[in-house]
Image (cartoon, rainbow, N blue to C red):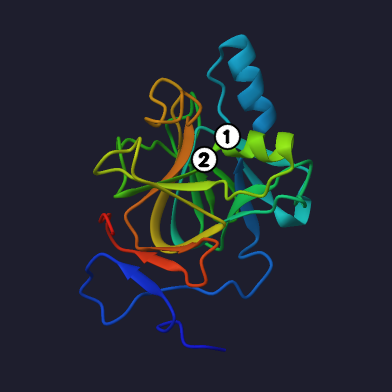
């Protein structure tokens, strides 16, 4: 296996000796996956509801889902998109992690154990970290309508211009505190109101694009 410290393009300064980049060496990381429930998203738009859309699925019972308002975890994670395959019922993009999840649910401010490593609790921080990761709905729709295969995972800077500072990629990996939120009243700028569910993290990211080398992103810097 090649060293994780070689053949990576680094953006931004970091005190570490080298980039902490991950390799995709297993089909699914951990025992659970996290994704946005598309059926609820569409129903919310049609009926102008704000029902929770963050879904957690156990691989041992993949057809069953816990729907939450938000999640918090602290572990190695991977955001993937598979254009022509799904893990269950049309789910083609999801987050993989082997960390324990803390859920935030409507009307349940106290912690409630839902299963091994899965708790319910409030999430109160407005923005968590430097980076925001989400699925770009317009790109996804265009791919399906026109038979294209453009990257649909969008990484945005939470500290600069959200609407313009964006990188589209095939896969994102990181290791550290993370939060997935559903905020219908405050969508991501530049998404035409569609970016209402997204991941926030302050951890360095490894972005896999169509370039030969991945990008290791420590902070947001314009490159020539």
Residue shown at 34%/44% (left/top)?
Answer: 165
Mark pair 2, 1: CA separation: 33 Å
The residue that label 2 is drawn on is 112
Q: Residues within 10 Å of mark 1 (few under 14, many from 20)?
A: some
Nearer-N-terminus badge (2/1): 2
Q: Is residue 37 left or right of residue 3?
A: right
Residue shown at 23%/70% (left/top)?
Answer: 14
Look at the numbered discs 2 and 1 and tell me whether their residues touch, using CB distance below 8 Å: no
- The nearer-to-camera label among 2 and 1 is 1
Q: Secondary structure at mark 1?
A: helix
Question: Which residue occupies the foreground of this view, 149 or 38?
Answer: 149
Residue shown at 25%/56% (left/top)?
Answer: 221
Of all residues shown, which one is farthest toward the front? 224
Q: Is residue 140 left or right of residue 107?
A: right
Q: Quadrant of the C terminus?
A: bottom left
Q: Secondary structure at mark 2?
A: loop
Q: List x then y, in percent, for residue 32.
A: 64, 55
Q: List x then y, in percent, for residue 120.
A: 49, 40
Q: Which mark is residue 137?
A: 1
Q: Which mark is residue 184?
A: none
Question: Which residue occupies the foreground of this view, 18 or 167?
Answer: 167
């Amino acid at each position: 296996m090649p060293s994780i410290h070689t053949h990576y393009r680094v953006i931004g300064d970091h005190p570490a000796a080298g980039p902490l980049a991950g390799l995709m060496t297993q089909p699914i990381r951990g025992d659970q996956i996290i994704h946005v429930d598309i059926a609820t998203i569409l129903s919310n738009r049609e009926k102008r509801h704000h029902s929770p859309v963050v879904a957690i699925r156990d691989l041992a019972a993949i057809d069953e889902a816990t729907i939450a308002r938000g999640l918090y975890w602290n572990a190695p994670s991977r955001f993937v998109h598979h254009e022509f395959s799904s893990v269950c019922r049309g789910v083609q993009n999801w987050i993989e992690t082997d960390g324990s999840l803390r859920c935030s649910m409507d009307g349940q401010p106290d912690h409630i154990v839902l299963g091994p490593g899965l708790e319910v609790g409030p999430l109160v921080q407005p923005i968590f970290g430097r980076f925001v990761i989400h699925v770009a709905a317009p790109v996804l729709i265009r791919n399906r309508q026109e038979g294209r295969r453009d990257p649909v995972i969008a990484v945005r800077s939470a500290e600069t211009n959200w609407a313009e500072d964006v990188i589209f990629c095939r896969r994102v990996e990181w290791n550290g505190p993370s939060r997935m939120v559903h905020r219908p009243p405050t969508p991501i700028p530049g998404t035409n109101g569609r970016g209402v569910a997204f991941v926030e993290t302050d951890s360095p990211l490894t972005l896999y694009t169509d370039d030969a080398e991945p990008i290791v992103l420590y902070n947001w810097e314009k490159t020539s």
